[in-house]
Amino acid sequence: MSSAPLVDGFDRVHDSLRISVTDRCNIRCFYCMPEEGGDYVSHNEILRYEEIERFVRVAAGLGVTKLRLTGGEPLVRRDLPDLIRMLAAVPGIREIALTTNGVLLEQHAAALYAAGLRRLNIHLDTLDRERFRKITRRDDLPRVLAGIEAAVAAGFERIKFNVVAVKNLIEPDIIPMARFCRERGFEPRFIEFMPLDSQELWGRGKVLTADEMIAMIEREIGPLVAVPDRDPRAPATDYAYADGGGRLGFIASVSKPFCLNCNRLRLTSDGKIRYCLFAIEETDVKALLRSGAGDAAIAAAIRRCVADKWIGHQINSTKFVPPPRPMYAIGG
Ligand code: SAM
Ligand code: SF4
């Protein structure tokens, strides 16, 4: 089996894998999930931890070094620290991160840290309980706040916060979230609203752009400077407060797509490889994992998926077609 790096048709080297461990979630952010129900995959269709580990071993042999666990809500999956331990032991894996809504973090933070997790992104749009309830259709802000404290107490540092920027909604939360992070030494990531919601609510006019948010923060808090040593392949454009008050990032997927530097692959909870959040096609790897296929066949499937990768999503083109699955079913 060749261990040559995973390079696509546009010379982009792929070393980062996002793994969705479940499509289920315990809250219902309106820009991601429907208010009721959800088209969940049945339990036996979800990859088992051993299957995820095998896939990661093969991917690591092809140069994947960074993993991010996501969902749905990854902490609703039982015994997640066990998976982290298994993945941390895979030769070649250098970094594991977790994206969570934080609702169950109070119970799990210490075990996650003990399992070796060090990088945490907590998704939180607002510090106002009523606004949180409106966005997520659940009254769980106190649990998220308790989860943040538990994560800090467990030892997590430089925690990042994901804030989804929906225009005409989130404006009152931008400055409080920026200040909260600045005061606590956290890093906010302001993410432009993307067309990945299950109810097709997205429209270009509903995107609060990175430039608009930067202008708000500079006006209300202070000047920002671009961080010179940032990784050009990371999705966020990083800034720092000019007065040394910490960092913050903007994910301008809509207003300034960063596809040309993309180094990411995704594995869905039901075992499909995707080369892009917005991809229309997927490569089935679960069938291989469950039919006794050898590592070489799995590696070939990964290479095929990377080889097929497009130059980038076309959100800004009239030809854009949203992916058939919403965010929670892909893994954000
Ligand atoms: N449940 C976890 C969470 O909320 O962080 C992990 C999965 S969630 C799909 C991953 C991230 O996707 C969230 O942190 C949120 O920032 C982002 N997200 C969800 N829907 C989005 C949308 N329509 N546009 C932009 N970002 C979105
Ligand atoms: Fe759940 Fe995360 Fe989607 Fe919100 S964004 S509904 S927390 S999966």
Image (tube, rainbow, N blue to C red):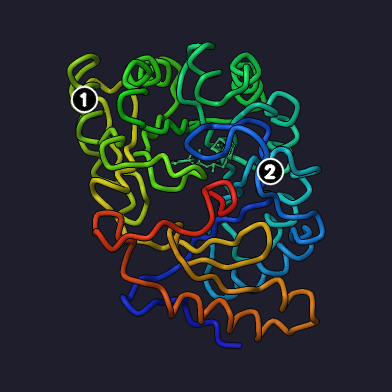
Q: Where residue 47 appears, x then y in whole percent?
A: 74, 61
Residue 242: image x %, image y %?
Answer: 21, 25
**Earlier residue among tags 1 and 2:** 2
Determine the image quadrant of residue 129. top right
> Horizontal placement of 66 versus 21: left or right?
left
* Label 2 environment density (alpha carbons within 10 Å; few <14, some 14–19, many ≥20): many
Q: What residue type is labelled 1?
A: Ala
Position above or below: 311 against 89: below
**Secondary structure under the numbered disc 1 in the rendered image:** loop
Q: Residue at x 36, y 33 (%)?
A: 190
Kind of residue sitting beneath label 2 = Arg
304 lies above or below 263: below
Q: Residue 222 carries which label?
A: none
Front residue of this view, candidates 159 and 271: 271
Q: Mark 1 points at which residue?
A: 242
Mark whose residue sits in front, 1 or 2? 2
Task: Give the number of the disc on residue 24.
Answer: 2
Please state if 93 lies on the left or on the right of 259 as rendered. right
Report how far apart the C-alphas of labels 1 and 2 lie in the structure. 41 Å
